[in-house]
Structure formats: C-alpha cells, structure tokens
Image (cartoon, grey):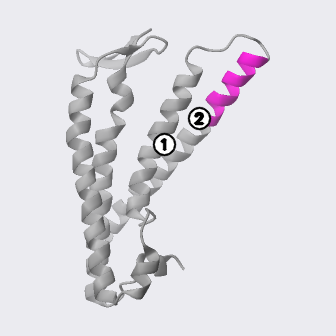
Amino acid sequence: MGIVKFIDTAVSKILTAFCSVLLFLMVAFTVYSVVMRYVFENPPVWGDLLTVLSNIWLVFFALALTVRDKDHIALDLIYAWLPLQVAFAVQQFWSLVICGLGVVMIIYGMEAVATMGGKYWEMWYIAWEDGRFVFHPNYMPKKYAIAIVPISGFLVCIAALASVLEDSLRLKAGTYERAQEAEV
C-alpha cells in the first residue's frame, strides 16, 4: 500500500506543477500580448491562442486534482446530516459517476482527436515522424489542442477510483471521514 500512496502523491505533485506552469504561462502570454499590442502596437498572432490553450489545459488538469481531493461540487450540508454509512454510499456513488464521466471523456475525446480537422495557422509544432522529432514551422493541427480531453478523462478515472479505494479502506479500518470533515 505504501507504493500506491507514493504514486498517488507523486502524480498529485506532478499535476500541481503542471497547473502552476500553465498558470504562469497563461499570465506571461497575456502580459506579453498586452504590452506588444498597446506599447509597441505589434501584437503577436499567437499570444491570445496560447493564453486560451494554457487556460483550457490548466482547467482540465485541475479537474483531476479536484476529483482526487474531493474538492468538486458536493452537497456537504446533506452529508453532514446523513448517517456515516449513508454519507459514505452517496460519496462513493458520486465518485463512480465522476469516473463514468472520465470514461465518456476518454471515448469521445479520442474520437474528437482522431476526427478533428483544421489547423491553427499561427502556431508551429513539433511532431514525431519516422522515429524522430520533426519541427514544423506553421499550422499546428487542432487535434493537439483538444488532446487534453482524453488525457484528463484518464486522470479523472484514476483519481475517482483512487478516491473510492481510499475511502473504502478507511471505512473498513474505522477511520473514514466525510469529505468536508477530512479538510478541517
């Protein structure tokens, strides 16, 4: 069980680091674009797009973190009134529903990535071709931008299942607490 806890903590720290980097990039792209637009009157064509993409990827990575930490929207007031066993069952049910949402994100996200047409004319990209990385100076495929959907779906499924497992083990050991009690 120690290795599972280690992996859980490592994944959480890695996702938090990704979110921090994406937040920093979002702010940096915004500041750079604003300065270039209003001070130098020469805005970059890619500035707004990278700001939006950073924001989207940040939100999807943060979704997995909130699912794992049970910080998602819940009816905590109702949980407080319910007997512990019933509150446990309701929380497990919602965790499984969220896991189902993750499966939907994986399935339809993969389909969207596979069928997504179009390119961002203002973006360069790096691709893996013929066993090596190749730099393409223009026209990044839009499927790269939405690839976060199935990635996040996978992370959400893992986070929800880890939450169910953790809560089940805690209930069995007699140390289970409702989500809002665990935070206090």
Q: Quadrant of the C terminus?
A: bottom right
Note whether residue 166 is visible.
Answer: no
Q: Quadrant of residue 143?
A: top left
Residue appearing at x 33%, y 19% in the figure? 127
Q: CA distance from mark 2 to mark 1?
A: 9 Å
Q: Quadrant of the N terminus?
A: bottom left
Label count reads 2
Which numbered disc covers residue 58? 1
- Farthest-out residue, right: 39
Query: In the image, 80: left or right of 26?
Result: left
Residue appearing at x 27%, y 23% in the figure? 116
Asked if the residue at tag 1 contacts the one at tag 2, i.e. Cβ–Cβ closer than 8 Å, the answer is yes
Q: Which residue is mark 2?
A: 26
- Which label's residue is closer to the chain start, 2 or 1? 2
Residue appearing at x 38%, y 60% in the figure? 67
Query: In the image, 175: left or right of 15?
Result: left
Type of amino acid at the residue the image marks with label 2: Met
Position of residue 17 measured from the top left corner of the image (x, y, whole percent): 51, 48
Task: Tell me, yes or no, whether the highlighted magenta stretch contains residue 43.
Answer: no
Query: In the image, 100: left or right of 135?
Result: left
**What element does badge 2 sit on?**
helix
146 in relation to 98, above or below: above
Position of residue 166 measured from the top left corner of the image (x, y, whole percent): 31, 73
Position of residue 146 measured from the top left corner of the image (x, y, whole percent): 35, 31
150 in relation to 28, above or below: below
Q: What residue span does the magenta drawing correspond to? A: 26-38
